[in-house]
Each structure stands twice: as C-alpha cells, then as structure tokens.
Image (cartoon, rainbow, N blue to C red):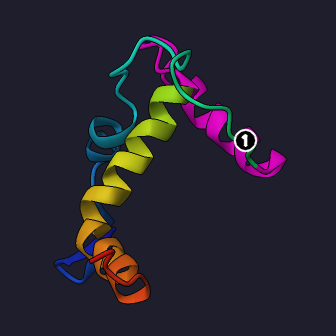
Amino acid sequence: MTSKKNGKISKKPLRTYEALFLTNRYPSGRTGKVVYIRPEYHERLLRIVQLTREEKTTLYSYIDNIFEHHFQEFGVDITDFFNERNKPIL
C-alpha cells in the first residue's frame, strides 16, 4: 500500500507485512491438510519465507497467516455470499 507525502509516493514499511504474515505461529503443518499450489506460486512463497531464515518462519505458517488475514478482512462478505446462495435447512 502506498501513500503520498510531500508530493512523493512512499510505501508502508515492510515491517507491517512481516508482522502480519511472516510470523511463525504454529510449529509445523503436520495437523493440517495437503493442498496443491501452482508451481510458480510455490516458488514465490518459498522465496519470501527464505528471507526470514533467522526467525525460521515456515511455509505452513506463512500460508496460514495469509488465510487468517483473508478471512478476517473478507469474513462478512464471504458469509453474505454463502448465505445468499444457500437456503436455510428449516
């Protein structure tokens, strides 16, 4: 995300991105499910995670953080979308 300051375009600090997505909240993905990712996305994700070697963020944790943010950001929209397309049981 960018903002204008004194006529110049500046980017938000990368630290915000790191705090949101590149934190290791779970030790491993062994309790999760297998998901297939396009090879080009897998390569990108791995390269981003490798930047955090000192913190040892796992690919599992990075993807989980992306999903968590997505559902927090769009949870109401997703629920509305679902409810509009499904009839109640009763």
Please report the residue visible at 53 percent of the width from the left and 20 percent of the height from the top.
Answer: 29
Q: Is residue 55 magenta?
A: yes
Q: Position of residue 86 (x, y in %)?
A: 41, 82
**Is residue 80 found left or right of 85 in the rendered image?**
left
Please report the residue visible at 42 percent of the width from the left and 49 percent of the height from the top.
Answer: 67
Pick the residue in front: 14 or 65. 65
Q: Position of residue 83 (x, y in %)?
A: 33, 80
Q: Position of residue 80 (x, y in %)?
A: 29, 81
Single out the residue that lies furthest toward the left.
6
Single out the residue that lies furthest toward the right.
39
Per the image, the residue denoted by label 1 is 42
Compared with residue 32, is residue 7 higher up or lower down, i.e. above or below? below
Please provide the residue range marked out in magenta: 38-59
Compared with residue 87, is residue 18 higher up or lower down, i.e. above or below? above
**Is residue 58 found left or right of 79 in the rendered image?**
right
Q: Position of residue 84 (x, y in %)?
A: 36, 88
Q: Where on the picture, by quarter, is residue 10?
A: bottom left
Pick the residue in front: 71 or 20. 71
Pick the residue in front: 48 or 77. 77
Single out the residue that lies furthest toward the front.
90
